[in-house]
Amino acid sequence: MFEFMPNGNLDSWLHPDVHDASQQLQGLTLIQRLNIAVGIADALDYLHNNCEPPIVHCDLKPSNILLNEDLVAHVGDFGLAKIISEPAAEQLINSKSSTGIRGTIGYVAPEYGEGGQVSSRGDVYSFGSVVLELFIGKAPTHDMFRDGLTLQKHAKDAFPGMLMQIVDPVLLSIEEASASSLLDGSNPMEHTSNAISSVIEVALSCSKHAPTERMCIGDAAAAIHRIRDSYVRITQK
């Protein structure tokens, strides 16, 4: 049924083809992006912690995140998914095998390219990369990321003081337009900045190089829920 999701995939929203009239050209608001991040985190939390045996997706990326009519995120394409029968039996990845590295360049955990183990922490890395892209607006394969500069380093170097300078300009323009229409003297852009900063902090924690230093997806999901709920509470007063 995922093939017929009316709003396509997340990649087409973040990077619309301006020459393709069929693609959505409107941007995603902050609350829509927060809801999408929540949906992805909840899906991974279910796969890792509520399936028996646990399932590791192994190829999380925006083109595999499908959006329904309400822009609720659904994780699709389980072609590379791996069932983990027990932690001690996690399968080694042979990067020289005929199947190559599991995942997609830019989103795949670095340990997978080094012959590491398939684990839930690999999905957490991919989740962090997707969330960074969701709020910064640049894919980890963007031309600017070379000579040692990665999406993670780009975000880390800007965090927290310069962060708003690298946030997706489409997102900022939407939120600034919304803020300018308010006449109550409030400062909604401060709430916007705080929410984005908090989400980026979670994403950076999820996409650390060492697997053992990353958040588990349950903690990441709980954190994203808190950020979203807090933003909704503050902005709907």
Image (cartoon, rainbow, N blue to C red):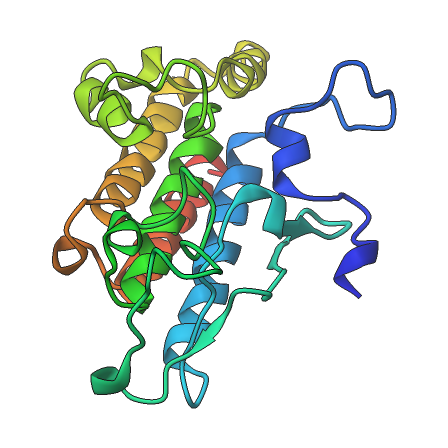
Q: Quadrant of residue 107?
A: top left
Residue closer to the observer: 82 or 218: 82
Q: Percent position (x, y) of residue 104?
A: 47, 45
Q: Percent position (x, y) of residue 36?
A: 54, 47
Q: Is 26 displayed left or right of 223 in the figure?
A: right
Q: Percent position (x, y) of residue 213?
A: 12, 54
Residue sitting at x 39%, y 50%: 127
Q: Is 49 displayed left or right of 10 in the figure?
A: left
Residue sitting at x 18%, y 57%: 211
The residue sitting at the right extreme is 21
Is 208 drawn above or below residue 30 in the view shown? below
Is 158 drawn above or below residue 135 in the view shown? above
Q: Is 16 displayed left or right of 134 in the figure?
A: right
Is 56 drawn above or below residue 9 in the view shown? below
Which quadrant is home to the N terminus? bottom right
Q: Percent position (x, y) of residue 74?
A: 62, 58
Residue sitting at x 51%, y 32%: 30
Q: Quadrant of residue 209?
A: top left
Is 226 drawn above or below residue 180 in the view shown? below
Q: Quadrant of residue 62?
A: top right
Residue sitting at x 80%, y 28%: 23
Residue closer to the observer: 174 or 146: 146
